[in-house]
Structure formats: C-alpha cells, structure tokens
Image: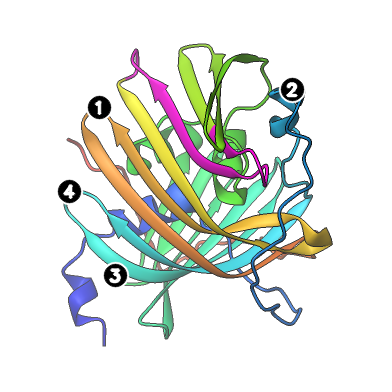
C-alpha cells in the first residue's frame, strides 16, 4: 500500500511534523464552511504601525486539519496533517498518507520532541534542541507555535521602522540577531508576508499568507500558508492548506511510544 513511501527515509516525517507540527483537527465539532472574511475596519490616517501587531489570533488551544506538501533536498512528499496545540505547552501532530492511514505522530514541548514512525516501527525521543536539527531551523518554541497559528513570529519588541508602499505597509522588528519584516494590507489589516532573517546564523524563513477566513469568534485565519526555511544553505519548503481550524476547544495531546518500537538517534552528517 505504501510502496512509494518506503523509498523515503523517516526523517522527512519528523521534519514535516516539526516544521509544521501542523495544525489541524476538527475536534468533535462540525466543520465550518470557509468564506472570505470581511476587511477589518481600520483607520488608515494616523494609525500607528504598532496597531497592526495587536491584530493577532488569541487562543488557548488549537485544533485543525490541512493538506501539506513538504520538500527538502532528499524528499518531495504530499500528506495530510492533524494538529492540536495548547498555547505555551504542547504541539501534537499526526501525518496521514494517501488519506488512509497514519504514518507518523509527534509531540513537541518547550523541552522535548517525541515522534513515532509507523513504517519500520521507529521512534525518536529527543530534546527540543536535537529536534531542531531535523527541521534544519533555529526557532524557539513560542516562535514555532506562532508559525503554526499564523501570528508574527516575533511581536514582543517595538517596531524599529516602517515603510508604506501603495496599499501595503512594511514593519521591521529586530530582536537579538534576528530581523523580521512584516507586510500588511493597509485596508484589511491582515498579514500577507513575513521574512525572518539572521545573517549571523545564516538563517532565513519566509511565509506567504493567503485565503483568510473567519474562525472562532470571527478571528481571521490564513487557511493557506507557504513556508520556506533556509538554514546554512539547507532548504525546507512546506505548503499548508487548511480545511478545518478551531480555537479554544478541548484537545487530547496524550502521547506514548510503544515498547515494540526501536528508538532512533539523529543521523550523523
């Protein structure tokens, strides 16, 4: 059944899970039809750049489902992802291949990454830092959750500068050695593009946000995300197209590694 999947090593699964420990799972609620959300009523004249940063998704838990496409130098895979998150605590993710069976599952916390790969009965039990080696990125846990939910990766610092270009406004934020540029639509107030860069780390992450629609409490949610991460010349691409997304619903994030699974280490380069 999974002939073509057997050609892939298990790393793409863990990388895909971490890279997006993708949202997804409709919990027990019925799914809602995705519709384009109405533009936010924003006063353009005299509006401070910081006001755009305040328009973030507020949540305590997240549940969603998405179709995903993952690419790196070795792999090119399509799969669906289910994701559950508890803000500040856990990212739980499941990968389903061919729309039929789960091929991998992962649990990510600020301290750890645990994952199981059904094919070959393999398991990973790593520190969070070791897990980042699989995604080929250097991001803190809150940043990873922001990436999942669609909020700016960095938003807890003042806007250093801003620039207006026709219907767009570009905000620049600097934290440590990271430089983040956020592009907002001035009419709707919605985030359209993000670039996070660190020349010191030779790291870049770009995200394009599309197909906004209202979810819980009518909060605008970007159902389509296109992510490119480049870390020291190693590139990872992840496209996510959500079909379901809910906030503040009960989520089960329990995780265990079966005794019959072989515990793996990170392959030596």
Q: Earlier in the sequence, mark 3 or mark 1?
A: 3
Q: Which residues are magenta?
A: 183-201
Mark 3 packing: few (<14 Cα in 10 Å), some, or many (20+)? Answer: few
Question: Label 3 to label 2, Cα distance in Å?
Answer: 54 Å
Q: Which numbered dot is residue 224?
A: none
Q: Which residue is mark 4?
A: 73
Residue at the far right: name it.
Answer: 217
Q: Earlier in the sequence, mark 1 or mark 4?
A: 4
Question: Label 2 to label 4, Cα distance in Å?
Answer: 42 Å
- Where is residue 268 shown, x and y percent of the image? 20, 37
Residue at 55% over, 35% down: 168
The reply to whether discs 1 and 4 touch (Cβ–Cβ < 8 Å) is no
- Where is residue 222 shown, x and y percent of the image? 58, 56
Q: Earlier in the sequence, mark 1 or mark 2?
A: 2
Q: Which is more foreground, mark 4 or mark 3?
A: 4
- Where is residue 100 shown, x and y percent of the image? 42, 86
Residue at 21% over, 31% down: 233
Q: Which residue is mark 3?
A: 120
Colour convention of the picture: rainbow
> In the structure shown, which secondary structural element does the residue marked by tag 1 occupy?
loop
Which part of the image, by quadrant, shows the C terminus? top left
Q: Which is more foreground, mark 3 or mark 1?
A: 1
């Amino acid at each position: 059944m999974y002939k073509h999947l057997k050609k892939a090593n298990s790393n793409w699964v863990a990388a895909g899970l971490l890279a997006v420990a993708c949202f997804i799972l409709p919990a027990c609620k019925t799914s809602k039809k995705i519709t384009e959300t109405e533009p936010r009523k924003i006063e353009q004249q005299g509006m401070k750049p910081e006001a755009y940063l305040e328009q973030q998704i507020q949540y305590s838990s997240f549940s969603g489902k998405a179709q995903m496409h993952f690419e790196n130098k070795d792999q090119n895979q399509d799969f669906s992802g289910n994701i559950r998150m508890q803000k500040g605590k856990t990212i739980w993710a499941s990968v389903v291949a061919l729309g039929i069976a789960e091929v991998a599952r992962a649990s990510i916390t600020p301290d750890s990454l645990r994952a199981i790969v059904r094919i070959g009965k393999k398991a990973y039990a790593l520190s969070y830092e070791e897990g980042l080696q699989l995604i080929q990125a250097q991001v803190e846990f809150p940043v990873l959750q922001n990436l999942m939910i669609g909020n700016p990766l960095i938003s807890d610092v003042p806007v250093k500068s801003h620039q207006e270009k026709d219907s767009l406004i570009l905000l620049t934020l600097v934290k440590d050695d990271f430089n983040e540029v956020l592009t907002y639509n001035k009419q709707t107030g919605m985030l359209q593009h993000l670039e996070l860069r660190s020349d010191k780390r030779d790291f870049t992450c770009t995200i394009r946000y599309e197909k906004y629609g209202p979810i819980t409490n009518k909060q605008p949610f970007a159902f389509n995300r296109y992510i490119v991460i480049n870390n020291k010349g190693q590139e990872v691409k992840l496209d996510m197209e959500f079909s379901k997304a809910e906030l503040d619903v009960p989520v089960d994030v329990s995780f265990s590694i079966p005794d019959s699974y072989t515990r793996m280490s990170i392959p030596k380069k």
